[in-house]
Image (tube, rainbow, N blue to C red):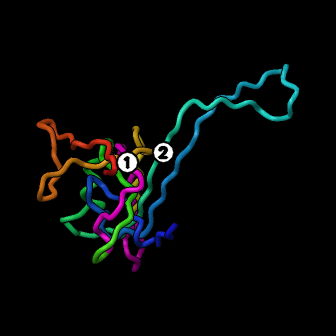
Amino acid sequence: MATIKGQNLRVLYNGDTIASALSCTLSVQLNVVKLSSKDDEDAYDINLPISLSWSVKASAVVTDVIDRPNAPSMLDMVGQSVMISLSRTNGSSNNTEDITLYAGMATISDINISAQNRQRSTYEVTFTGKRDMLQDIRLLVTADNHALETASGHTLAAAHEER
């Protein structure tokens, strides 16, 4: 088992690495309902799992890069569904996807931009999962690596199986 260094674990947004990324975090949470009653003799609650939820947070420097996702391009997408993947990367600037670890559809639910005097401006974006994060899902792309979209603007993706 190989260790993946932090600079090689990146969030990809619709197939592109986030420009000038600083950090990323995947959170997976099991939601439960308590079934305890007065009749229980144990000292512990009885919890029944009801669902899984997940989110991905990424922080990056605010830039004017136009060929990769950044704060200005994501501000217009708040509330919309996007394809998110947590992937191992390589190549120059670590922006070429090597292996997808997790992927799924998510909603851009929060963007916070921070600009302090004489400091670089940063932002944090939160992607709230909709489904499928625990499966290897990848964008459907053309031979020249352009994502396929429907006439209504939805990006196409499908579960990936190793050959």
Q: Residue at x 69, y 28 (%)?
A: 34
Disc 2 marks a residue whose amino acid type is Trp
Q: Is residue 19 left or right of residue 118?
A: left
Tell me if 152 is positioned left or right of 84 in this view: left
Secondary structure beneath disc 1? loop
Residue 136 shows which numbered tag? 1
Residue at 52% of width from left, 38% of height from top? 52
Q: Are marks 1 and 2 in contact (CB under 8 Å)?
A: no
In front: label 1 or label 2: 1
Q: Residue 112 is drawn in which quadrant?
A: bottom left
Report which quarter residue 21 is drawn in: bottom left
Whether 160 is drawn above or below 66: the answer is above
First in sequence, mark 1 or 2: give its number: 2
Distance in Å between CA atoms under marks 1 and 2: 15 Å
| SS at circle 2 | strand
127 inside magenta stretch = no
Where is residue 66 shown, x and y percent of the image?
A: 19, 65
Q: Residue furthest bottom?
A: 118
Q: Residues within 10 Å of mark 2 (few under 14, many from 20)?
A: some
Q: The magenta stretch spans which residues?
A: 94-122
Q: Residue furthest top?
A: 39
Q: Horizontal and vertical percent for residue 91?
A: 29, 75
Viewer-closest of 125 and 133: 133
Q: Position of residue 98 (x, y in %)?
A: 32, 64
Q: Residue at x 84, y 24 (%)?
A: 40
Q: Which residue is denoted by mark 2 in the rendering? A: 54
Judged by its main secondary structure, the magenta piece is strand
Q: From this viewpoint, which residue is outermost toward the right?
A: 41
